[in-house]
Amino acid sequence: MAESSTTAQNLPSTGLLLVGMGPGSVGAMTLEAVEAATAAAHRRYEAYTALWPDKELNLLEQTIGSIQRVMRPEVEQPEELFALASTSLVALLVVGDPLQATTHVDLQLQAIEAGIECLVFHGISITTLVTGAIGLSNYRFGRQTTLTYPYGGWVATSPLETIILNRFTGLHTLALLDLDPTGLGTGDQRPMDPSDAVEAIVLMREKIEQGLSEREFSNDNPSDMMMKEALHSFVGEDVHKIRVVLCSDMGTGDQRIVSTTVDGLKDEAGGRLNCIVFPAATGEVEEKALLRWAKE
């Protein structure tokens, strides 16, 4: 049973195909991905971790055949997908690369455990596209994160803590922006825009600062002590002045890159889908590369 990438030749008659759509256009999909999706009897578009422009999605449908949109419940509880895949060939279309999200890796593992052949057709991922596009060294990126909406008044601080720790250790951070204000993944999505991101960052900063004096760190845990030092150092910093690079609609004809500050994000309209890079200290070539995106 295949667990890795394959070719579109000699596809099985039944099974699940995880098909990478790339960043946002039919032209950016691999030929094998298009061929595999065309060969499938059923095509499902996973529309809650990322989105394509409607124009391109319509063009893709004209190219490969009808597509049905599915949301979080259908992917995380895949009984219906597996029932189809047990008797026919099903393609799950995923924006970017199909194995960049833990959700899809888990789906792949569940399919294998259920005895369903699962083949992968990789696509261009935002995680590799952004780093090269803006000119920062891919080797100097730390753990990536997602800036989330406050859900029901709850503010998660872990995204900002990831950024703080990365910057403290000299690593850049790619922060994806949330798509779903409800956190349910069932629809009614509203991709986070730059001003939403500023609000989320400020709320996380306030919560971290308010709780830092009561937070316990283990002296026996080096990682814990490093986080303590990083957070205490960050509290003295003006979060509004932190440099960021806003990347909008990457990999499409509407791609836009702007180097600004957290405060400056409030003046940026962004695009259909945005992400933000938080640079750490930059080398000479990196700094020169970033200057290209500074607003005049």
Image: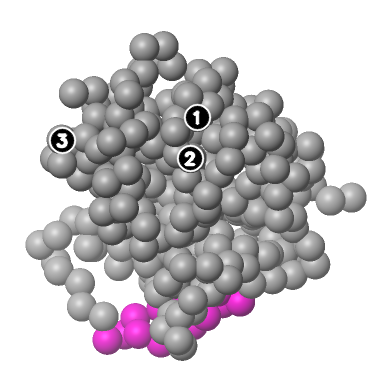
Residues tagged 1 and 2 counted as in contact (Cβ below 8 A): yes
Q: Is residue 268 left or right of residue 25?
A: right
The amino acid beneath tag 1 is: Ala
Q: Main secondary structure of the magenta part?
A: helix
Disc 1, SS: helix
Report the front residue among 117 and 206. 117
Label 2 crowd bin: few (<14), some (14–19), many (20+), radius 10 Å: many
Task: Tell me the distance, in whole angstroms, between the alpha carbons under discs 3 and 1.
Answer: 21 Å
Element type where label 3 sits in the image: loop
**Residue furthest toward the right?**
296
Q: Residue furthest left?
A: 220
Q: Earlier in the sequence, mark 3 or mark 1?
A: 1
The residue tagged 3 is 115
- Indicate whether residue 8 is drawn in magenta: no
Residue that carries the numbered disc 1 in the rendered image = 37
Disc 1: CA contacts within 10 A as few (<14), some (14-19) or many (>=20): many
Q: Which mark is residue 43?
A: 2
Asked whether residue 156 is in view, the answer is yes
Q: Which range is magenta?
A: 197-214
In contact (CB < 8 Å): disc 3 and disc 2: no
Q: Would you say 50 lies left or right of 9 here?
A: right
Taking the spot 36% from the left edge, 18% from the top edge, the residue there is 11
Position of residue 208 measured from the top left corner of the image (x, y, whole percent) = 41, 78
Residue at 45%, 30% (x, y): give it.
Answer: 40
The image shows residue 95 at horizontal and vertical percentages of 53, 42
User: Residue 62, how many percent across, how many down?
Assistant: 68, 34
Q: Nearer the viewer, residue 250 or 233?
A: 250
Q: Amino acid at mark 2?
A: Arg
Tell me if residue 285 can be seen: no
Q: Is residue 209 magenta?
A: yes
